[in-house]
Image (cartoon, rainbow, N blue to C red):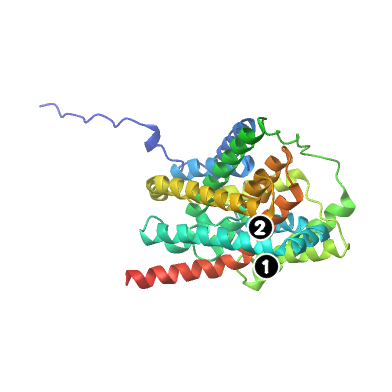
Amino acid sequence: MQKRVPPEPKTTFSSVTFTHLAKPVQWSLLLALSLFLVYLGEMAGLPAAILLGAMLAAILMASRESSIRVHRHLTLLAQAIIGLLIARAMTVEFFASMGQHLPVIFLSTGFTLLASTMIGYFLARFRIVSGTTAVWGISPGAAAAMTLMADSFGADARLVAFMQYLRVVLVVTVASLVVMYATGTQTAAPAAIEWFPPINWPALLPTLAVIICGAFLGDLSRIPTGAMLIPLALGAFLQDMELMVLDLPPWLLAVSYILIGWRIGLGFSRAILAHAARAFPAVLASTLLLIAICGLFGVFLGYLLDLDPLTAYLATSPGGADTVAIIAASSDVDLPFVIALQTSRFFIVLLAGPAIARFIASRIQKQIK
């Protein structure tokens, strides 16, 4: 009797893995896929298209069980570059504008933090997302910095990144629609970027020195996110004392965004992606709720301070200062006021975030017990 040979299993995309491929091949695939997705994001006008494209490409590679990882030292340098990017906004004019609007800044930041913390609490309370991850994920700060800090404080940086960048996309979309409805005009596209401008060596070399030394000192300090915070403080001091000019050419920023996106994305797994998919409806609803609450507060603030409604809305919108600034610059609003509130809130959240996350996590653990 002839022995029956079982049919070979069909190969599907879901069964394809990259573990058998040489690492140079995997890196080449990741780079090619990242460039393609970044291009699509730029064409679609997505905020943070470079970081999002790199992160999505890395997630796709991780879902196919890729074995490559971004070296820790490269991650530290990328964090230091982000720190100097923030420091560059901390000019003398920024502190002057912040001082003029200090009561409003504290009122607005306090309300937004309260709203985001309560939403994060309920996400954690009903076990949709864990305690610290929920608070960091819904926190209204700069997405890249919040993700880096969350990772340092023990939260799941992958889910935090998922929540943060979903918030960024939703905030920008809603804000653009509000501007179009209020003014009847399209928001202006950001100016074309010259990726490789002439190199200003007298400014670039000291900047690179601060990046390398700051990342090294931050790593030695054992401070959470020290590789970002120490260059931030050092760069702001040197800049405001007029001892140096922080020179961050677009190609250098792009490299840092790609490295951070790869680091986050390659940390995903199929299990994490499945959890993110299950949490998506609740995260989407909670983010839209935060946008609506901040919008209503903007209406109240505009009435209280006799501001035009659009200025008040953009100033209190729970998005990053960079993306909101692009939208605000395309309409007739008080741009310095918008930037002062957005940037000041980020620094306050940066300082208060760890304590709030720990408090919420401890409260949730007590209630579960």
Residue 266 image position (x, y, % from top left) = 51, 49
Residue nearest the viewer, comparing 224 with 369: 369
Residue at point 53% right, 44% down?
A: 58
The residue indicated by pointer 1 is 218
Residue 114 image position (x, y, % from top left) = 52, 62
Disc 2 residue type (three-letter)? Gln
- Sequence order check: which comes first, mark 2 or mark 1? 2
Q: Is 252 drawn above or below residue 195 in the view shown?
A: below
Q: Is 206 drawn above or below residue 317 in the view shown?
A: below
Instruction: Left or right? Give the position of 284 relative to 297.
Output: left
Query: Any mark on residue 79, and which?
Result: 2
Disc 2 crowd, CA 10 A, few/some/many (<14, 14-19, 20+): many
Residue at point 50% right, 44% down?
A: 59
Residue 61 image position (x, y, % from top left) = 49, 42
Residue at point 64% right, 37% down?
A: 179
Disc 1 residue type (three-letter)? Gly
The quadrant of the rendering that contains the N terminus is top left
Residue found at the far top of this picture? 2
Disc 1 crowd, CA 10 A, few/some/many (<14, 14-19, 20+): many
Q: Is 118 drawn above or below residue 191 in the view shown?
A: below
Residue nearest the viewer, comparing 126 with 224: 126
Q: Are marks 2 and 1 in contact (CB under 8 Å)?
A: yes
Instruction: Left or right? Give the position of 171 relative to 359.
Output: right
Q: Is residue 75 visible?
A: yes
Residue nearest the viewer, comparing 202 with 337: 337
Residue found at the far left of this picture? 1
Q: Secondary structure at mark 2?
A: helix
Query: Any mark on residue 329, and which?
Result: none
Residue nearest the viewer, comparing 33 with 301: 301
Q: CA distance from mark 2 to mark 1?
A: 10 Å
